[in-house]
């Protein structure tokens, strides 16, 4: 009896395993059935083509770099992320269609966040979908105009001054040289400390919700008393808009520089009012700006210093940028000004070249919101198919950039000659990074301040050349950190 009982269990287990295997492999001919070219090699049941990423053996960017290379000359190729069929798109013309021309068919990014489980992240602009995304993007765009950025420069300068002071103290204490790890904490050390940012995701949501609620209340009171003009930061502007209850169609043209023609024509958007924005909505955006903004901007600043501190070519370019900073500051009475930063064109090329080699966000994603036939073919991308664009790989592809691993800022002197869609560190189209201007200003300002006072050498004992990227990180970040030796300029 016992044996036969065991036999039934074993048989059931085998049947269950076979059923599971059939279930897991049944979709693996998804692309073949629809006539799409596919990444060569057999996708694995359950893990698809992304086994190494899902098991923490390869970073997101390294995984996509491999798939991009495996796809060879194919303009697009079907693949599986786990069990989900996705399309890797390599052709700049098709990328242009997906991001801009036919954006209406690929409006969403494809992150599924359960609003009941994680209300703040679900309400953040980056995860919103369809009309809700359009309404929020239209509300937030006026917060990022060049006028507002200019007004924020003194605040950025104050943060940099604090950083320079800390670094100088460190250098003096350590007989003329400080060893520094470049990371997030470099930019706003005091703020990080003040906010006690050692938080888990849940704690972070509660923290931001309470923090924003309290801050909004105080700012509103200050504005009522006519005392609120001194802040000038993102939150202040958001609270001002909330208080005025302005509708999107009442915002002046010059106060909305976003390229979002797609949104401007939308009837529902134009009636969206600031009056009924909730504290949760505000907190969600504050948390997003903090997360999406800080990590990426810090990654750009660190990798730029890494490139400029490398012995040889890097140090030579560091010298040239410093000369430019010195010259422009001298022309502007020894100060770093908004107009001066715009005139630092080598600095701009250096930042772009760093973004090419180390794009903090290594890939873009969209999801098809309707069936879409790829122009010139009869291949249909079905609704709900995830699209990936490996910006890291395109920016390292010899087809688009000669000697792609060489750090050569001057290649940006010929920017108009290359295909715009092969260089997309901030994405493109109506859903491109809303914080691009802010990030570039902040990094330009920090770097100009640092180079005006210090000289940097890479600590090669602690930082590998070329850099190794962390395997488990959402953004492209060094596995070992980036360590530089800083000394005061002679
Ligand atoms: C060097 C710094 C940064 C890089 C490289 C970067 C990169 C990106 C990229 C690639 C995207 C996706 C674009 C697309 O899908 O087409 C994105 C979206 C976004 N970024 Fe950034 N970003 C940076 C800084 C910032 C900052 C400072 C902020 C806010 C203050 C910010 C806020 C956002 C938001 C809200 C989105 C979602 C936009 C939407 O869905 O409408 N980013 N960013």
Image: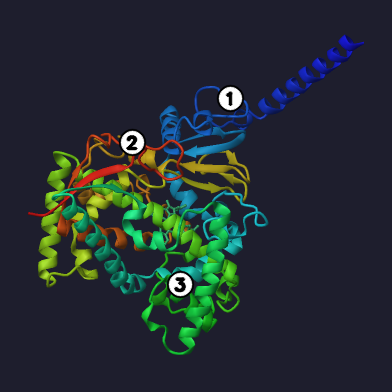
- Spatial CA distance of label 1 from label 3 is 47 Å
Residue 18: give x, y in percent of width and height.
74, 20
Could you tell me which residue is drawn at 72 percent across and 25 percent down? 20
Disc ID at residue 346: none
Q: Is residue 149 above or below residue 325?
A: below
Q: Which residue is mark 1?
A: 44
Number of residues whose C-alpha sits closer than 10 Å to that of mark 3, classed few (under 14), some (14–19) or many (20 or more): some
Is 167 displayed left or right of 255 in the figure?
left
- Asked where in the image residue 386 lies, by quadrant, the reply is top right
Sequence-earlier tag: 2 or 3: 3
Q: Is mark 3 within 8 Å of ligand 1?
A: no
Residue 124: give x, y in percent of width and height.
54, 60
- Asked where in the image residue 81 lies, by quadrant, the reply is top right
Is 317 displayed left or right of 297 in the figure?
left
Res 265 visible: no
Q: Answer yes or no: do the residues labelled 2 and 1 have beta carbons within 8 Å?
A: no
Residue 342: give x, y in percent of width and height.
23, 64
Disc number lying in front (2 or 3): 3
Res 287 visible: yes
């Amino acid at each position: 009896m016992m044996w036969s009982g065991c036999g039934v269990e074993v048989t059931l287990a085998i049947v269950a395993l076979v059923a599971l295997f059939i279930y897991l492999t049944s979709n693996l001919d998804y692309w073949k059935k629809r006539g799409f070219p596919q990444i060569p090699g057999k996708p694995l049941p359950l893990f698809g083509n992304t086994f190494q990423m899902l098991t923490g053996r390869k970073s997101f960017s390294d995984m996509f770099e491999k798939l991009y290379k495996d796809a060879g000359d194919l303009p697009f190729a079907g693949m599986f992320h786990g069990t989900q069929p996705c399309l890797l798109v390599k052709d700049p013309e098709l990328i242009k269609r997906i991001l801009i021309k036919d954006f209406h068919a690929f409006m969403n990014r494809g992150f599924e966040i359960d609003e009941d489980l994680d209300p703040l992240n679900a309400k953040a602009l980056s995860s919103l979908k369809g009309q809700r995304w359009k309404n929020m993007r239209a509300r937030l765009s006026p917060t990022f105009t060049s006028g507002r950025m200019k007004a924020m420069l003194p605040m950025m300068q104050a943060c940099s001054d604090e950083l320079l002071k800390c670094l100088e103290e460190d250098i003096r204490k350590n007989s003329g040289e400080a060893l520094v790890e470049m990371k997030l904490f470099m930019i706003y050390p005091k703020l990080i400390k003040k906010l006690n940012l050692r938080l888990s995701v849940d704690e972070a949501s509660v923290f931001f919700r309470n923090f924003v609620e309290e801050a909004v209340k105080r700012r509103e009171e200050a504005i009522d008393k006519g005392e609120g003009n001194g802040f000038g930061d993102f939150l202040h502007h958001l609270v001002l808009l909330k208080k005025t209850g302005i509708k999107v169609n009442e915002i002046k043209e010059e106060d909305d520089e976003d390229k979002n023609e797609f949104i401007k024509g939308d009837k529902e958007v134009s009636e969206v009012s600031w009056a009924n924005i909730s504290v949760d909505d505000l907190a969600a955006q504050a948390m997003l700006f903090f997360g999406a903004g800080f990590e990426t901007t810090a990654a750009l600043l660190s990798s730029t210093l890494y490139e400029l501190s490398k012995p040889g070519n890097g140090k030579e370019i560091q010298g040239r940028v410093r000369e430019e900073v010195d010259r422009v500051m001298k022309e502007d009475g020894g100060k770093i000004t908004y107009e001066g930063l715009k005139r630092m064109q080598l600095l701009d090329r250096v930042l772009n070249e760093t973004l090419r080699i180390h794009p903090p966000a290594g890939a873009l994603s969209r999801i098809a919101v309707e069936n879409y036939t790829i122009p010139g073919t009869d291949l249909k991308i079905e609704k709900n198919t995830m699209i990936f664009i490996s910006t890291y790989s395109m920016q390292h592809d010899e087809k688009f950039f000669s000697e792609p691993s060489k750090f050569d800022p001057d290649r940006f002197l010929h920017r108009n000659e290359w295909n715009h869609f092969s260089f997309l560190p901030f994405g493109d189209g109506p859903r491109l990074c809303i914080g691009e201007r802010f990030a570039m200003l902040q990094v330009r300002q920090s770097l100009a301040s640092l180079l005006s006072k210090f000289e940097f050498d890479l600590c090669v004992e602690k930082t590998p050349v070329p850099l190794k990227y962390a395997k488990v990180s959402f953004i492209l970040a060094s596995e070992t950190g980036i360590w530089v030796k800083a000394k005061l300029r002679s």
